[in-house]
Structure formats: C-alpha cells, structure tokens
Image (cartoon, helix red, strand yellow):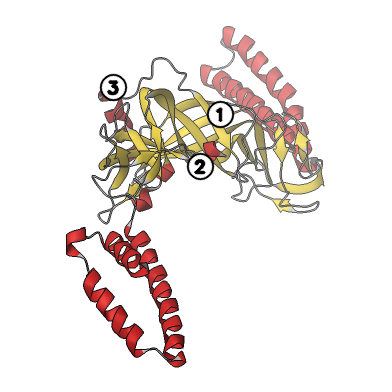
Amino acid sequence: MGGEYFIKFLNGCLGRRPSAVFVRKKEYQMSFLRVKTSCSNSLCSGFNSIGLYLCFFFLALMAAGCAQKEKTEPEDPKVAVFNVRPQKFVVTTELPGRTAAFLIDEIRPQINGLILKRLFTEGSEVKAGQVLYQIDPAPYQAAYDKAQANLPALQLRADRYKEALLDKAVSQQEFDDADAALKQAEAELDTARINLNYTKIVSPISGRIGTSTVTDGDIVTAYQSMALATVQQLDPIYVDIPQATTELLRLRRSLEKGRLNQDRVDLTKVKLILADGTSYSLEGKLQFQDITVDPTTSSVILRVIFPNPEGILLPGMFVRAVVIEGVNDQAILVPQQGVFRNPKGEAYAWIVDSENKAQQKILTLDRAVGDKWLVSSGLNSGDRVIIEGVQNIKIGETVKIVPPAAESK
C-alpha cells in the first residue's frame, strides 16, 4: 500500500498523468516481493528498514524540488516619480564681482615744501575740508607779504598816470606800462595767497583715510607721483560685475522667443552674496551697463550701487551678485536627482508614459536652481519624471509607481 501512495505522490510532483506512471504498480509489487523473499533473515530485515527510511528521505527531497518549481510571477520594478507642472519663476543669474569705493581721492601736495605735521589718525574717518598735513608756510608767507607790500605803490603810480594822461602830461605808453605793472602785482599777490593756502593739505572728500606714506620732516614736491595718503568713501559703495557677452546673447534670445518677460519685475534690484556665503542684508540698485567689451575677457561691466552704513563692504572684496533677468511664466523645474548624462554628454531623464512604461527623453538644461534644474526643452506639463529606482529599469519596461522614500518616512 505504501508503494502505491509513493508512486502517486511522485506522479503528482512530476506533473504526470496516471497513464504515464513513472514506476508501474505491478513492477513495483514484483520488485517488492523479490526483496521480501530474498531478505527473510534478520539482516535483510534491517536493510528493509534502512530502505524505508531512504525512501522517505528521497520523498522529502523531491517534495522540496516540486515546491521550488511553483514560482510566482515577478513584480514590476518600483519607481518614485516627480510630476512636472509649469510654474512662474523669476529667473536670476549669479555673477562674480568686486567692490569699489564710491569716491576715492589720492592726497598729493600742490607745492614744494617740508612736512611740519601730520594732522590725522591713520584708518580714521575724515571730513571734507579737514586739514591732513601742514607744510612749512614760512617761505610762502614771506612771498605773500612781499607781493602785498608792493601793491599800494604800484596802485598809486597807476592812478597818477591816469590823471596825467587826461592832461596830456604822460604818453599813452607810459600809462599802459604803469597799469600792466599794477595788474602783474595783483596777480603775484593772488599767487602768493594761493600757495600760502596750499601749505595746508586738506581732504577734498569725506571718507576713511588709509596709511600715510610720509612722516613729519619729509620733503615733498608739487604733484609728485607718490600719494601722501588715500581717502575713500565707502557709503554707498560700488560693485563692478563682469558679464560675458555669451550670457547677454543668451538673454536676448530668451526675450525674443518669449521665454522671459521683463515688464513685470524690477530689473534694477540686485542682491549680494558675501565671500563666506552669507547674504548681504541690503539690496543694491543697478546703475548702468557698460557698452564697451573688454577684449581680454570678452565681457562688459555692470555697475551696482549698494548702501553700506555699517562698513561691512570694503573696497576690493570678492562678492557674488544675484541679478534679475526676467520672469518665466511656464518654467519647468525638476529635481537634479532625476537628470542624468549619457556617454555623449547629453542630459536625459527617465519618464513613465501613459502605459506605465519607462522611457527616456533628451533634455536641454538652462541652469541649476538650488537642488533643481531649470529645463528649457524636452519635458512637458504632466510628464512623470522618475527620481528613484532608475537602476532597476529598462526602456519599455512596465514599472510600478510608489511614493518617494522621503514621503514614505
């Protein structure tokens, strides 16, 4: 009886019909009788027991093999998607720049002389008209006094000659000479007064003064090449931003194609990012765009003016300016994790089509915006961009959409 059940179980595991029995019943019974007849002693009885256990062992192995054959259908790859929706986006560009003083003046002497005293503290704030250096005034005071002393006598002489000319007592030439001498003396007096005033070197602007290149007792000459000191006005302050001509041409094409609108945004507002990555709290205003292209860099200069009441911005600082280009009413932004590069260097994205199959699309990228890409072309509203699970998919393969890992948490 046990043999019959064993054979039926084998046929069931192997998927055979009863007519195609792997080991027929009669053959099994005859084999079983022969084994029973030949093994009538105790030794054979032991072997029969062992054989029975072996049968059960092979039975278990075959049952496990049958279970492995019963395989389930493979599941579709799971992916997370980003739904593309056009949105209004203010397009900006981040450009490097350097700060420059609003006003700058290099202090130089206008006369020759000896520096008697430096009258300011280096690095301090100075006011317009404040005396910075005192040049020895003695020789210039003497010249002024001399010119002033000669003037009354020449004035009287010119007056007498004028009266005498009416009486024909002097010639016209003599009167002209006396009058010219008077005017020359007046001019010399004015020159002496100007030079005497130049002995006090004053600041023409208000601002912060730097280091002094001379000390008390140094000899200076008029309009020398080396400045005595430099005064810079830092509030407000300029930021000069070079912009490549290629960027200007790209911006012009975007405006012509209607991708950007400049009518509904203030293009003069500029934000600033400092060298340490922090944002400057005050907005600047775009003053002008230069029309001359620098042949060495192929760029033009944008000049922006920023308020600087606390003196945070110093001349020569490296900064980054955020300049507004316009508004894109149909901007498409996709996460950067959903954009890849093929061997040709082309940007592409995996999408899920209407039949829930994975496909690829070639993209044209405009710029990075935070952790997203601004896409110029290649995607449409309603596209589902795969952002997770791309490593397990193939083109045309059916996929199963699941929530992103961040949302499932």
First in sequence: mark 1 vs mark 3: 3
Between 336 and 259, which is closer to the camera in this rendering?
Answer: 336
The residue that label 2 is drawn on is 405
| Disc number for residue 258 | 3
Q: From mark 1 to mark 3, how far is it between C-alphas? A: 30 Å
The residue that label 1 is drawn on is 305
Where residue 131 appears, x then y in whole percent? 77, 35
Mark 1: few/some/many CA within 10 Å (<14, 14-19, 20+): many
Q: Secondary structure at mark 3?
A: loop
Quick check: 6 above or below 144?
below
Where residue 25 appears, x then y in whole percent? 24, 69
Mark 2: few/some/many CA within 10 Å (<14, 14-19, 20+): few
Where residue 116 appears, x then y in whole percent? 81, 46
Q: Is residue 296 visible?
A: no
Between 29 and 200, which is closer to the camera in this rendering?
Answer: 29
**For the residues carrying marks 3 and 2, which lies nearer the camera in this image?**
2
Quick check: 49 above or below 249?
below
